Amino acid sequence: MKMASVDGTNRVSMLIAALEKNCGTSDAQVHVAKAPGRVNLIGEHTDYNEGFVFPIAIDRNVIIAGRRRSDRRVRVYSADYEQLNEFSLDDIAFDKQMAWSNYIRGILAVLQDAGCELSGMDLVVTGNIPQGAGLSSSAALEIATADIATALCDLTIDPVDTAKLAQKAENEFVGVQCGIMDQFVSKLGRKDHALLIDCRSLEYRHIPWLSDQVRVLIADTRVQRGLVDSEYNKRRQECETGLQALSQVLSGITALRDVSISQFREHAHILDPVVRARCQHVVYENARVLEAVEALESGDWVHLGQLMYASHESLRDLYEVSCPELNAMVEIARSVEGVYGARMTGAGFGGCAIALVEERALEDLEKAILRRYPEMTGRDPQLLHTGVASGAHTCFWKGQ
């Protein structure tokens, strides 16, 4: 299953044509912004415990073409939904009818709240990130919007601040209480590098991907993640309960990321069994992330894969956020020679699994999933294989 190029001019040319068709012709300079989706190699449910995550940007993305207007109007055309949305920068309100537009509205609202001077703009947007699969299409749309607005309005914004503003837009305007990982890697990802993020300090490191023969296969279970919201909030509360109990015996801890494995082993008995399991996952998962960084730095794909399997087992058995379909994907991956490791990725209860696989074994893995997954689950999967892509960037459109 080969993936079409996302860096050619064909999609951008389509956007330029759609811009002129839906927003009219203009002499204004056209800018183009592109921002990728992401998968997390390891480090699940650690972000809200101020821990570590280790994502990569994928080569599926959102692209926005835009030009500046002389008034305060914003016109946005979605080439994917074939819908035109208009609003004023002086009255940015939530749109219940065209939900996709709220990610754009939210970004422009928080930029203005931060003191940025915006002008009106005409925008056309398209994306090829599967929606609802946990690949961060919303974060890519937010970052692309922030970048196109920055270019059109001659703004200067630090990349980390851009990610923080995008997270704020999703939290406060859209109303989704996400962490910062998605926006962060979409903005700051680097080609052929994974990104280690400290979710407390927002310090980060780019870790080189030392082989062009090791790929990531994304396997969408096609299970909608219906339990995420309620169970996500429940897990957060269980972690907070565990932290409060452990803080009575461990001085100076303010998040589960401060608890070492040895400390947890010594004091785990004071925790309720369910809370103990949740906290055990977080404590050990943080350690696995740092170990995974060392494995990638040394090119030890076997050990990195083992850590991914261990992460999945912990998410399945201790954090209890997997599902039969995700487990089936990992089980199939384990059976294929040339697969280093596999795990669920994202919040859980559906969405995607990922596998770290040798290039030569990619076709074997795809065939195994396409044959066995429907037999095991009654569902047809969607498979995407990806390189490690670059983060967001913006350019002038000069035509072909």
Image: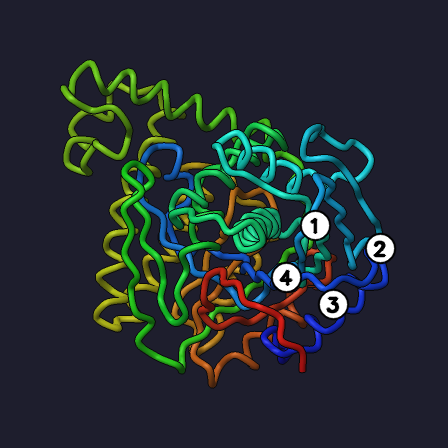
Q: Which mark is residue 63?
A: 4
In terms of secondary structure, where does tag 1 sit?
loop
Q: Which mark is residue 82?
A: 2
Any part of residue 154 in sight: yes
In terms of secondary structure, where does tag 3 sit?
helix
The answer to whether residue 340 is above or below residue 255 is: below
Q: Quadrant of residue 9?
A: bottom right
Is residue 359 shown left or right of residue 219?
left
Q: Residue at x 82, y 35 (%)?
A: 97
Q: Quadrant of residue 225?
A: top right
- Amino acid type, residue under disc 2 in the picture: Glu
In terms of secondary structure, where does tag 4 sit?
strand
Q: Which residue is tagged 3?
A: 16
Mark 4 and mark 3 lie on one chain; the one further toward the N terminus is 3
Q: Which residue is tagged 1?
A: 69
Is residue 310 shown left or right of residue 152?
left
The answer to whether residue 291 is above or below residue 358 is: above
The answer to whether residue 306 is above or below residue 317 is: below
Residue 383 rendering spot, x and y as whole percentages: 63, 67
Residue 308 rendering spot, x and y as whole percentages: 38, 57
The answer to whether residue 73 is above or below residue 125 is: above
Q: Cα distance, mark 3 to mark 2?
A: 14 Å
Mark 4 and mark 2 lie on one chain; the one further toward the N terminus is 4
Mark 1 and mark 3 lie on one chain; the one further toward the N terminus is 3
Q: Residues within 10 Å of mark 4 (few under 14, many from 20)?
A: many
- Amino acid type, residue under disc 3 in the picture: Ile
In terms of secondary structure, where does tag 2 sit?
loop
Q: Cα distance, mark 4 to mark 2?
A: 15 Å
Q: Cα distance, mark 1 to mark 4?
A: 19 Å
- Amino acid type, residue under disc 4 in the picture: Ile
Q: Nearer the viewer, residue 379 or 130?
A: 130
Q: Nearer the viewer, residue 82 or 277?
A: 82
